[in-house]
Image: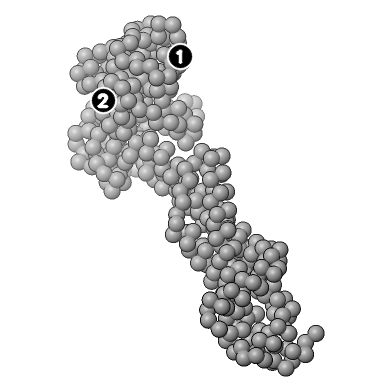
Amino acid sequence: MSLLETLVLALRALLRSKTRSVLTALGIIIGVGAVIAMVAIGDGAKASVQKVFDAMGTNMLIILPGSSRSGGARGGFGSQPTITWDDLEAIRTQLPSVRGAAPEMRSNAQVFSEDQNWNTSIIGTTTDYFIVRSWTMAQGARFTDADNEAGAKVAVMGQTVVDNLYGKGFNPVGQVIRINKTPFTVVGVTAPKGQSPVGQDFDNTVFVPATTFRRQVQAQSLGTFITGAVFVQAASGDLTAKAQADVTQLLRERHRLGEDDANDFDVRNLAEVASGQQQSTETLSLLLAAIAAVSLVVGGIGIMNIMLVSVTERTREIGVRVAVGARPRDILAQFLIEALTLAVLGGIIGAAVGLGVAKLLAAQFGWPMLVRPDVALLAIGFSGLVGVVFGLYPARKASLLDPIDALRYE
């Protein structure tokens, strides 16, 4: 018998018991579907995490000032100003591993347009802040170093603030807003960034020059100290860890800390945080994929069980075929192809089901759905391997039947 004839016979045998064939393939369908869905969702989750950290800025370090102490109670990092403007200038100019650095002084205030108002975050910073944070402009331009030196009353607005003060689609460049009764001219609007991992709206912000912030927005001036964090961008992704070490060493030297003295600041590497988030996601994805692989093996056991039942039911048929000239290898091929066909068809259906489930879950969680064709092909190929492995024993048992005993079988 040719391979095509054997395949046709196998398909006819499977179609004679459609319900049993579907139920037999169900384990394979569930297993392959679970693998495809979990990998797609896992990749989408990793892409979503990476997108959030890309929005915060690439190759970025955050320097938080020291911890306060009152009556034995210690505050967290950021509660005691310890970073000076001279420290910031030294980081910007003395470290080759650093591309840029900028302060982030933050305050909440009510912002007024001509007929609307909105409570938002006011950030005082320098023009380097937009470079460090990878923040592009949607309209207008960011303020300049000259604006910062002159203490100009200019502002750059986030898209959320624009939508609430003027409505969607409005270009506010050139408009005048008031912050703490002080008029500011809008010179630009930042491109939308979305939300942080903790739900903070990056676009609900108004940026003003640092000098202007200290004079017009800040409740009190701390002189040489920066009232907030410092954002640092490493020269490249490979130099992020070196930049962290360089910044730490420089600040320890400038603050004259001894070998046994603890840092009066904290340098945080967002690349490490992002890597930790992705590793957690990858671990969960691998765990779910392993569980799905177990269901594939269970599906294979189901195929072996049904094929053994099929051999028993078709014993007389096997005897007749052997009696008219079928060789043992023909019988082996027929039952093996039945198991393989059942597994591969189950794998294809499972892949389609998995893609559908992944699409629904991605839409539910707001994640991108990343389909990997190599994973789909590997899952279908593995399902075929399961069919061969678990179908080999029933097929071999059928090929070794004695034709006389098979013909006498009732």
Amino acid bearing label 2: Thr
Question: Residue beneath label 1, please?
Answer: 118
Estimate how packed mark 2 is, as few (under 14), some (14 to 19) or many (20 or more) residues with alpha carbons within 10 Å: many
Q: Can you give x and y, in whole percent of width and height, for residue 46 in the image?
A: 45, 46
Estimate how packed mark 1 is, as few (under 14), some (14 to 19) or many (20 or more) residues with alpha carbons within 10 Å: some
Q: Is residue 388 left or right of residue 241?
A: right
State the quadrant of the N terminus: bottom right
The reply to whether residue 195 is visible in this rendering is: yes
Q: Can you give x and y, in whole percent of width and height, for residue 369 in the image?
A: 48, 46
State the quadrant of the C terminus: bottom right
Q: Residue furthest bottom?
A: 404
Give me the residue at 56% from left, 62% from top: 347
The reply to whether residue 231 is visible in this rendering is: no
Q: Nearer the viewer, residue 368 or 153?
A: 368
Query: Quick one: SS at disc 1?
Result: strand
Determine whether label 2 and label 1 are within 8 Å by CB.
Answer: no
Q: Find the distance from the CA under tag 2 to the CA under tag 1.
A: 24 Å
Q: Is residue 366 left or right of residue 130?
A: right
Query: Quick one: SS at disc 2?
Result: loop
Amino acid bearing label 1: Trp
The numbered mark at residue 127 is: 2
Task: Determine the image quadrant of residue 387.
Answer: bottom right
